[in-house]
C-alpha cells in the first residue's frame, strides 16, 4: 500500500522536497496530526469544514446531558419535516453543539416543541401553553437551554426556561407585570453559553418598554431598563455583554452589565429588525435605508450606508461574527412586494461582492421576513413569503458569492429562520399556505447545508489512505477534494486532508 501511495505521489508531484514532506506526513502519529489540526483548519476555508476558530465559547455552564451531534454521514438536504394540522410555527432556533432545535407553535395548539436537529422530526417533548396571543423561542448555542416568551391574552408575559435534562418541566419562570401587554417573536434572546437571557415587553398604554436581563441558570432578574418607545426586537452578542434593541426607528446598543447605552442611531422608518455581530463590535440597522456602524478604537464609526428607492431594507439583515460581512435582502413595495434584491457587502473594504434580483408575478406578496449568516459569513440564508408564480424557493441558502447552495420550496410562507453558527444547519418554521391566504397548519424543517466531514471523500466515516488516493485521482481538477475553494485540487488541499486525518468529528 505504501508503494502504491508513493507511486501516486510521484505521478502528480515532481518536487522532491514536497515528496519528502508528504512521506513524513504519512507516518505522523495521530497525536501529531491532532496537534496540527487546529492551526491547519484556521487557514482553510471554513465554509466547507463547518469549523469557526475566531471565537470559542466554553461549554461549562448549565445542564448538558446530551452528547454533541454525530453528523458526518448525513447528506445535505432536508433532514426532517414536521407537519402540524392547525398551528403555525413562526419562531424557531437551533443550537450549535447540543443537537437541539426549539420550535414555537402559535395560533392554535400553542406550545413549545423540542426536537433533535439530526433526528426524525418527532418532538422529544412538548410544553403546552394556555391560549397565548404570541409564542417566541430562543436558545443557547453551546449548552442545553431553550426559552419561551409567552404573551398572555389578558396582558402580561411569561418567560419559561427548559433544558434537555429536565424535559417539559420548566427549570425557571419569569413574569412581566400585567401592564406589559405586547411583544413579538423577536423580543427574546440567549447568550451562546446560556448565562444571560434578554427579554422585552411593551406597555401599550404608557408607550414604554421594559427590557430585562435574566440569569440563564435561575431566571433571577439581574438588571432592567425602561425604554420610552416600543422595543420590537432584541439581540445579544455571543458573550451576552452587549445587546442591540430595535426601539422604533432608533437602534440602541446597550451594555447588559450596566444597562448603559453605548451608542444609538436612527434609521428611516420603524418596523425593521436590527442586528449585532457575535463579537459585539458591529451593528446593522435598516428601514427605508440601511446603516452599519462599527466600534473602531472605542469610537462608533459608520462603515456602510445604503438607500434603495421604494425598497424596505429592515427585515433581511444579517452579519458575520466579526462584522466583516453584511447580507442584505430587500423587497420593493412599489412593485407589489414582488421584486427582491440580494446583496453581500464586504464591510472591511466597503464593497459589494455580489448582487442579484428576483422578479415574481401574481397577486401574492414576496415579503422578506428574515436573513441569517454563519459566523464566518460564508453561508447565508433568507426566507420570504414566495410568489404566485414560484419564481424562487421560499427558503434560499447561498454562499458568499450568492451562488444558491441549498433551498426548500415550502407549500406556504415561512415565518421563522435560524442557522447554526457554522452554517451547517438551517431550521425553518412556516405556514401551510401563503401568508396572504387565510388558513392554518404548519411545516417545520431541519436542513443540512453541507457535510460536516468534507475530507471523507469515500463516505466511510474517517479520513484515511482511501481518501488520500481519491484526492490524488482528482489532482489538478475542480473535484470534491478542492477543500480550499481555489478551483483546483492541489497542495493546499492535500495539507488540509492530512490536518484532518482520522475519524470524522
Image (cartoon, grey):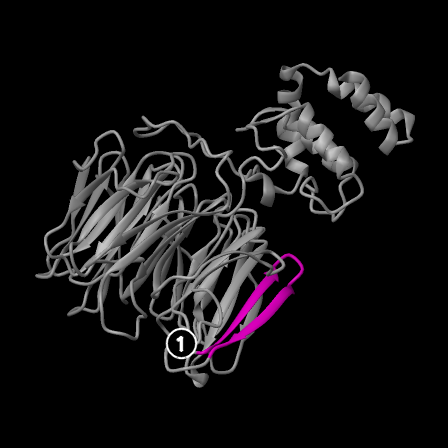
Residue 336 colored in magenta in the image: no
Q: Quick one: quadrant of the N terminus?
A: top right
In the rendered structure, the answer to whether residue 288 lies left or right of residue 124 reads right
Look at the image and tell me whether residue 266 can be seen: no
Q: Is residue 345 magenta?
A: yes
Disc 1 marks which residue? 388
Q: What residue range appears in magenta?
A: 338-360
User: What residue is rendered at 70% in x and 42% in y?
Assistant: 482
Given residues 339 and 78, the one toward you in this image is 78
Q: Could you tell whether 433 is left or right of 250 in the image?
A: left
Tell me if residue 356 comes above or below residue 295 in the rendering: below
Q: Position of residue 458 (x, y in %)?
A: 62, 33
Predominant SS along the magenta part: strand
- Where residue 186 sits in the image (x, y, percent)? 32, 58
Q: Position of residue 314 (x, y in %)?
A: 43, 69
Q: Which residue occupies 32% across, 53% down?
A: 444
Residue 201 location, quadrant:
bottom left
> Where does the image place residue 328, in percent across and percent down from the top left?
51, 65
Amino acid at each position: 500500500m505504501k508503494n502504491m501511495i508513493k507511486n501516486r505521489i510521484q505521478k502528480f508531484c515532481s518536487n522532491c522536497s514536497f515528496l519528502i514532506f508528504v512521506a513524513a506526513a504519512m507516518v505522523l502519529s495521530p497525536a501529531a496530526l491532532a496537534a496540527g489540526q487546529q492551526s491547519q483548519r484556521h487557514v482553510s476555508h471554513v465554509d466547507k469544514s463547518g469549523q469557526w476558530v475566531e471565537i470559542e465559547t466554553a461549554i461549562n455552564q448549565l445542564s448538558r446531558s446530551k452528547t454533541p451531534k454525530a453528523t458526518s454521514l448525513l447528506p445535505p438536504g432536508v433532514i426532517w419535516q414536521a407537519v402540524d394540522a392547525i398551528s403555525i410555527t413562526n419562531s424557531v432556533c437551533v443550537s450549535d453543539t447540543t443537537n437541539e432545535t426549539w420550535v414555537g407553535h402559535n395560533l392554535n395548539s400553542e406550545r413549545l416543541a423540542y426536537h433533535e436537529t439530526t433526528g426524525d422530526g418527532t418532538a422529544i417533548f412538548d410544553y403546552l401553553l394556555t391560549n397565548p396571543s404570541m409564542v417566541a423561542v430562543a436558545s443557547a448555542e453551546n449548552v442545553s437551554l431553550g426559552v419561551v416568551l409567552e404573551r398572555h391574552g389578558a396582558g402580561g408575559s411569561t418567560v419559561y426556561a427548559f433544558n434537555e435534562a429536565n424535559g417539559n418541566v420548566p427549570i425557571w419562570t419569569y413574569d412581566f407585570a400585567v401592564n406589559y401587554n405586547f411583544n413579538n417573536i423577536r423580543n427574546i434572546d440567549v447568550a451562546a453559553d446560556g448565562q444571560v437571557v434578554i427579554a422585552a415587553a411593551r406597555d401599550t398604554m404608557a408607550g414604554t418598554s421594559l427590557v430585562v436581563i435574566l440569569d440563564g441558570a435561575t431566571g433571577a432578574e439581574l438588571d432592567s431598563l425602561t425604554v420610552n418607545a416600543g422595543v420590537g426586537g432584541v439581540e445579544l452578542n455571543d458573550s451576552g455583554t452587549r445587546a442591540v434593541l430595535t426601539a422604533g426607528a432608533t437602534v440602541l446598543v446597550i451594555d447588559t452589565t450596566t444597562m448603559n447605552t453605548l451608542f444609538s442611531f436612527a434609521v428611516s422608518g420603524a418596523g425593521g429588525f436590527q442586528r449585532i455581530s457575535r463579537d459585539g463590535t458591529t451593528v446593522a440597522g435598516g428601514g427605508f435605508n440601511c446603516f452599519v456602524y462599527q466600534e473602531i478604537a472605542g469610537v462608533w464609526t459608520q462603515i456602510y450606508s445604503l438607500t434603495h428607492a421604494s425598497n424596505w431594507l429592515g427585515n433581511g439583515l444579517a452579519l458575520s461574527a466579526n462584522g466583516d460581512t453584511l447580507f442584505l435582502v430587500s423587497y420593493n413595495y412599489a412593485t407589489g412586494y414582488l421584486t427582491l434584491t440580494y446583496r453581500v457587502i464586504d464591510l472591511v473594504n466597503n464593497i459589494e461582492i455580489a448582487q442579484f434580483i428576483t422578479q415574481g408575478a401574481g397577486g401574492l406578496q414576496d415579503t422578506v421576513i428574515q436573513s441569517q449568516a454563519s459566523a464566518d459569513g460564508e453561508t447565508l440564508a433568507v426566507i420570504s413569503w414566495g410568489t404566485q408564480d414560484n419564481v424562487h424557493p421560499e427558503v434560499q441558502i447561498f454562499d458568499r458569492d450568492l451562488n444558491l447552495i441549498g433551498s426548500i420550496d415550502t407549500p406556504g410562507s415561512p415565518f421563522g429562520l435560524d442557522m447554526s453558527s457554522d452554517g451547517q444547519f438551517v431550521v425553518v418554521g412556516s405556514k401551510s399556505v401563503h401568508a396572504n391566504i387565510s388558513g392554518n397548519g404548519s411545516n417545520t424543517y431541519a436542513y443540512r447545508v453541507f457535510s460536516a466531514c468534507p475530507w471523507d471523500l469515500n463516505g466511510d466515516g474517517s479520513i484515511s489512505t482511501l481518501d488520500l488516493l481519491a484526492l490524488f485521482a482528482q489532482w489538478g481538477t475542480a473535484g470534491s477534494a478542492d477543500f480550499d475553494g481555489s478551483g483546483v485540487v492541489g497542495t493546499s488541499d492535500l495539507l488540509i486532508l492530512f490536518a484532518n486525518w482520522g475519524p470524522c468529528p
